[in-house]
Image (cartoon, helix red, strand yellow):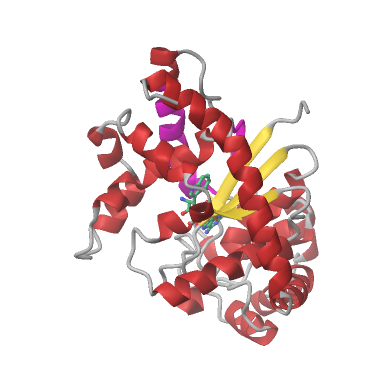
Amino acid sequence: MDKKTIFSGAQPTGYPHLGNYLGAFKNWSSLQDEYNCLYCVVDLHAITVRQVPAELRKASRNLLALYIACGLNPEKNIVYIQSHYTGHAELAWILNCFTYMGELGRMTQFKDKSSKGDTNINAGLFNYPVLQAADILLFGTHLVPVGEDQRQHLELARDVAIRFNNIYGDVFTVPEPYIAKSGAKIKSVTHPERKMSKSDEESSQIILLDAPDVVMRKFKRAVTDSETEIRYDVENKPGVSSLLEIYANTRGISMDDTLVEFDGKNYGYLKTAVGEAVVDIIINPIQARFNELSANPDYLDKVLKENAEKAAYIGNKILRKVKKKVGFIV
Ligand code: TYM
């Protein structure tokens, strides 16, 4: 009863990768006993970019199955699809009226996306962080486990909550980000100075559903540097440092212990060791469970339906309060 609430989500676009896992999904599983958790497949967010309908449907189911395959217990956590509960969109509209254009214009993710020359710079893309704030605030969320790239969106959610509360009293819980020290910004394997991103070429991402030999090959081709010494130095040796970080995080050991393991070894040895650790500890177990779930669509349908109902039950309490406060007849 006294447990605090966690909310987080991921977009059902592209293929979930090692960054999503180490930055988000892995932490979600580790928090599931201590908190009441809601983990959402945010398909409303996904349509800010044009999607092929049948592919989006498939990606949403697959992502939900992947959440479970990554260790989330659907009996203990509310794992569901955003569009199955209309409360998200309703609260987002209300919060739009409490968010300033200037705030949204400052969001780096919007600036990045809108500067890439795409012609479809729609209002949904601009308002994206408001929907994200609604996701979070709808459930009285205390903690939001995400990767580093979501920090600014969480700041906005906090600002909007505080603004609303200042006008209407304590309606929203002001959420805190939970950004782990390790894994919050996993780097691209081909461009280790930038984060691993779904929008980059596939060779730069370790995709959770890649075949194990593909994962090994991608690690073996990982970009390092022209030196030979294995040392943790993010600024001067981003590629090697990223491999070391992935290894330490995957094995759950400290950087000091990791460096001892690779003392005197060469880059080839490091790449193989990282690839093997990721395949054995992450890729193989996730894929085995994912394949089991994919073979049982009825089970997934049941999870989808039951969990959306549970989310709606919790969300509607806060939504009703918000509607009353702003003057709707409820
Ligand atoms: P999305 O789908 O881009 O990413 C899902 C989660 O993965 C994290 N992540 C990373 N972590 C470490 N290294 C990386 N290279 C890396 N790339 C991605 C993200 O930080 C995220 O935690 N806007 C969100 C989805 C969202 C949401 C929410 C999250 C919608 N509503 C409410 C939290 C709460 C997004 O696009 O995540």
Residue plotted at (34% across, 63% down): 49
Residue plotted at (60% across, 70% down): 62
Residue plotted at (59% across, 33% down): 141
- Tally of numbered tags: 0
What is the x, y in percent for residue 309?
A: 63, 48
Viewed as shown, does residue 56 lie left or right of 317?
Answer: left
Viewed as shown, does residue 256 lie left or right of 179?
Answer: right
Magenta: main secondary structure equals helix
Does the rendering let one see residue 247?
A: no
- Which quadrant, please, contains the C terminus? top left
Residue plotted at (64% across, 59% down): 304
What is the x, y in percent for residue 248?
A: 73, 58
- Which quadrant, please, contains the N terminus? top right
Q: Residue furthest front?
A: 329
Instruction: Choose top left, top right, bottom left or bottom right for residue 209.
Output: bottom right
Does the rendering let one see residue 329?
A: yes
Of residue 230 and residue 13, the one placed in the foreground of this image is 13
Looking at the rendering, the stretch of residues picked out in magenta corresponds to 141-164
Classify 290 as above or below 327.
below
What is the x, y in percent for residue 129?
A: 39, 43
Instruction: Choose top left, top right, bottom left or bottom right for residue 90.
Output: top left
Of residue 271 and residue 45, the one placed in the foreground of this image is 45
Viewed as shown, does residue 154 lie left or right of 25?
Answer: left
